[in-house]
Each structure stands twice: as structure tokens, then as C-alpha cells.
Amino acid sequence: MSRNTNHVDNNNMNDTFEKKVDRCKRKELSDIIENASRDHAKYLVKALLDKAIKKNEPIRIVTGTFDGDFYKGLVDAFSACTEKNIPISVIVLDKEFNPASHPMAKLIDSGNIRLLTIADDKIEEASTAPHFILVGDRRFRLETDHDQAKAVASFNDPSMGRWLMETFNWLVDASNKTQEDNHRECVAAA
């Protein structure tokens, strides 16, 4: 199947953003969808979570703060994923993150969401790591401008999926190495 690199035109008045997302999700199109608002972002994340359930695919998220205001509207969708035993792994790039006060605290506490907090002062590259959600190996939403909630997304882009998976795995490995180094420093100091 050849890759369709067409951008979905979000300004076309005959086709709403939601219809475009639904069409791309249903047909598993490789079109690049651009979103430019928090409402679009929520709709895309919900569509990706729905696809995770339908395809029984794991969910990986890299986020700066795991913004509670954004995610509180998605708790039911994440709960539906955990009810179907969909693995969910979240990397939070904010050492100040407090999971106890997060809208998804119950899911985190129950172990249904695997959470890794990385202090970006411990892993230099973490401060520039992209923020994204990856479902399976090809469905994603990748932020291009966090402050304006701009992002690109696709329901069928294996090459971008591979890169996002490598980025996620690199952050996990770098965090594990940092923890091992800290442990060795503590043992040596003792």
C-alpha cells in the first residue's frame, strides 16, 4: 500500500475536523491530520484510544506535565482501555508531577497505567523530547507546538510509529540507566 502523504485540510467547510478524524480512523488512512486546538487534541486522543481498544494495541504517551485539565475529560476513555486490559505506559517529563492529585489517580494507583516520571535535569535530552501518544506501531498524535496545542496525527504511519517507539524506549532506557547510576553513587557514598 503506498503512503498517502496528503494533509487533511482542516479549513474545508464541507468536512468537519471530527468527520476527517473519523474517516481516517475508520479506513486506517495514512493521511496526516493537523490539529490546532485543545478540543481537536481531545477528539484525536479519544479516537486513538478507541482504536487501541478495537485493535487491542498498547498505548504509549510522552507528556510534559500530564495536564490534569486536559486529561480529566478522557478518564472514561482511559478506563475503557484498562477494562479491556490494554497496556498503557506514560512518561511524564516533569519531576514535580504529583500522581495523587491527577484525575487518573485511581487508574495509576491500581497499576492499570504504568507511570514513569523523568526529571529533565537528570536526562539532558528529556527537555527536548517530543510529546506524543502512540497506539500500536502506527497510530499517533505528535505535538508540534505545545503552547498552542498544535499537532499532527495519523492512523497509519508505520515509519513515524517506529521513530516514536524508539524515542519512547530510549527515554525508558535512559531513565533506567540514570536510576542505576544514582544507585551506584549511593552505594559508593555509603
Image (tube, grey):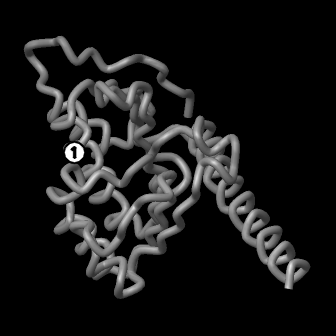
Q: Kindly identify which residue carries mark 1.
A: 42
Q: Is residue 122 above or below residue 188?
A: above
Left or right of 10 on screen, residue 126: right
| Of 75 and 86, the residue lying toward us | 75
Report x, y in % for residue 125.
Answer: 68, 41
Report x, y in % for residue 11.
Answer: 18, 12
Identify the image quadrant of the C terminus: bottom right
In the picture, residue 57 is in which quadrant? bottom left
Total of numbered circles in the picture? 1
Taking the spot 40% from the left edge, 25% from the top edge, the residue there is: 145
Taking the spot 29% from the left edge, 25% from the top edge, the residue there is: 148
Say few, some or many: other residues with alpha carbon within 10 Å of mark 1 (under 14 / 14 to 19 / 20 or more). Answer: some
Taking the spot 21% from the left edge, 36% from the top edge, the residue there is: 38
Residue type at the position of mark 1: Lys
Taking the spot 24% from the left edge, 56% from the top edge, the residue there is: 68
Report x, y in % for residue 131.
Answer: 47, 42
Left or right of 58 on screen, residue 166: right
Q: Is residue 33 above or below residue 181?
A: above
Q: Residue furthest right?
A: 188
Report x, y in % for residue 73.
Answer: 14, 56
Left or right of 127 on screen, residue 19: left
Q: Is residue 52 above or below residue 129?
A: below
